[in-house]
Amino acid sequence: MGNEVAAQAALAAGAEVMFGYPITPTTEVLSTWISLATQHQKKYLQTEDEGAAGFGVVGACLAGKKAFTSTAGPGNVLMQDPLSMAEALRVPFVGLIGQRGGPSTGTVIYSQQETTLTAFGGNGEGYRIVYSPSNLQEIYDLTILAFNNAWLYRFPTFVLFDGYLGKMKGEVNLHNPGILINAKPILEGNVNLRNCFNLEEEIYDLNVRHKKAWQEASSQVSKFEHRPGQTKTLVFAHGIVAAAAKAAGVSLFRSITLWPFPVQDARIVAKKYEKIAIIESSYGQFGRIVKEALFGLELEVQEIYKPALGFTPEEIKEIVK
Amino acid sequence: MVPFPKCYKQSSKPSKFCPGCGYGLMFKMLGQVIDELGIQEKTVLGLDIGCSLLAWDYFDFPTTHTHHGRTTATMVGFKLADPSKVVLALMGDGGGYAIGLQNLLHAAIRNNPLTALVLNNTCYAMTGGQLAPTTLEGEITSTTPKGRDLTITGQPFLGPELIRSVAPLNAYVARGSVSQPAILKKYLRTALEKQINDKVFSLVEILSLCPVNWKTDAKGSFDFNLKMQKIFPCKEL
């Protein structure tokens, strides 16, 4: 199951502690981690709500341990409070998010409506790395990558999947993770960390430093897959919708990092086509990112949006025939 | 003259707290306890947002701002990740007993081995003095302009009494006052020793002084503190 794979990947990535609050469709990440923790002398805390889980992750990261949480939907909304602090202090927070239908409590199993929330939630500028896996193997691989890049670049980092993928069963190669980035204490020695400032100039300087670091990290982190297919229309999709597009055999630009979006790569690939189709299970949360990245190119743009509903390969083939 | 505690960060003095504020008195007792226990090298302090945030560079050991009400949750995470540290979570009465009560309660229920310090000045002080859970009956604040009416806003909140009722018996709960510094120091010392030796949760509420929002002079501030002690009994619970 995808949720079990995510917990296994966290273990392989060197995670030491998980803080979590049960919520469908990601509860099994927590329960699987607790089983693994017992076997491997790791730690966990089932907290009183998602906010406490998120702040627990922040505290554990400040102490120098790889820590993570997993949540969904309304839990992801509550998680924005600690994530705002994680952004301010450049805390290597790792979140494994299983999207469910919104708004509000919505439905419990599928959507792609947490793109904006996960990448841009909070009162900052959205300096967060967001991976979108398309299959179970990628949940494993991208979760390991998420821990590495979180500690390498010190930005909150997410693996944004959905309930379909979280509950899906299949074969996964739980391979050796390779070289891991080490964690180290952030709050130690004579460090006094601030997220509250006296002067506008002080917080401006912090934003300038964050922007510079983000730009440097973006070129290293952004990731995509271009698969030329049988169609003259290039499909932009991510996650499980991209998997359906792949099965449909259409030309595909799959964004593996939703944020930072691979802007230059997308522009180079899109120029080879006259038309693009953005297909996603929300009203254009991913589409807005794509259209901003491709701004100025002479392209016909088709937008196919079905919030909280999935797409079959046959449906996608029909859309872009 | 009694010197500053050694664990103070000298370069950040004089502090940024208002003249007559009770934080300095509390910090002096806390600093002396940290010096006497010899734990400066392993102490970590998390701070609420509110007046407590002004202590972000008060001490010469690691400190961090958190978010309003989220100090306990953050420091629970820190302590779980690094149990070798002596972990303090400092917050005001709004942070501890209103927005952050859920986190404080559950840390106490779980007996998480950290020390929560809640400074009670009967109001939200940094935002200019609004009704807090601890505001006294009849006390005028900017959101109770005719004085706190208990029929509308309920009784002044007894934090340590509530925590005592949910925390395991070996957790330590006390309420002291900056007007009785020697007794307060004893409570702070016991709270830290409980965390270090017994690995249990400890809470000390500190009755403070807030002359700016109370609009009191020096004598008036201590008179107000005495009035608080009649509502909020100072003792180990």
Image (cartoon, coloured by chain):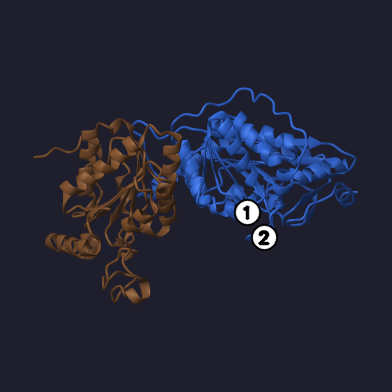
Chain colours: A blue, B brown
Res B127 quadrant in image: bottom left
Q: Is residue A177 depicted above or below A78 in this figure?
A: above
Whichever of labels 1 and 2 marks the residue nearer the N terminus, that label is 1
What SS does tag 1 mark? helix
- Between residue A112 and residue A279, name the one nearer to us: A112
- Between residue A106 and residue B173, name the one nearer to us: B173
Which residue lies under the disc numbered 2? A106
* Residue at mark 1 to residue at mark 2: CA–CA distance: 8 Å
Name which residue lies at 75% across and 39% down: A135
Q: Please state, as top left, top right, bottom left or bottom right, where the N terminus of chain A lies in the image.
A: top right
Instruction: Give percent across and percent down for residue A54.
Output: 51, 46
For the residues labelled 1 and 2, say whether their Cβ atoms are less than 8 Å apart: yes
Report the side of B16 relative to A244 (left or right). Answer: left
Instruction: Give percent across and percent down for residue A188.
Output: 38, 32
Chain letter of mark 2 equals A
Which residue lies under the disc numbered 1? A73
**Observer able to see residue A178:** yes
Report the side of A315 relative to A130 (left or right). Answer: right
Instruction: Give percent across and percent down for residue B84.
Output: 38, 31
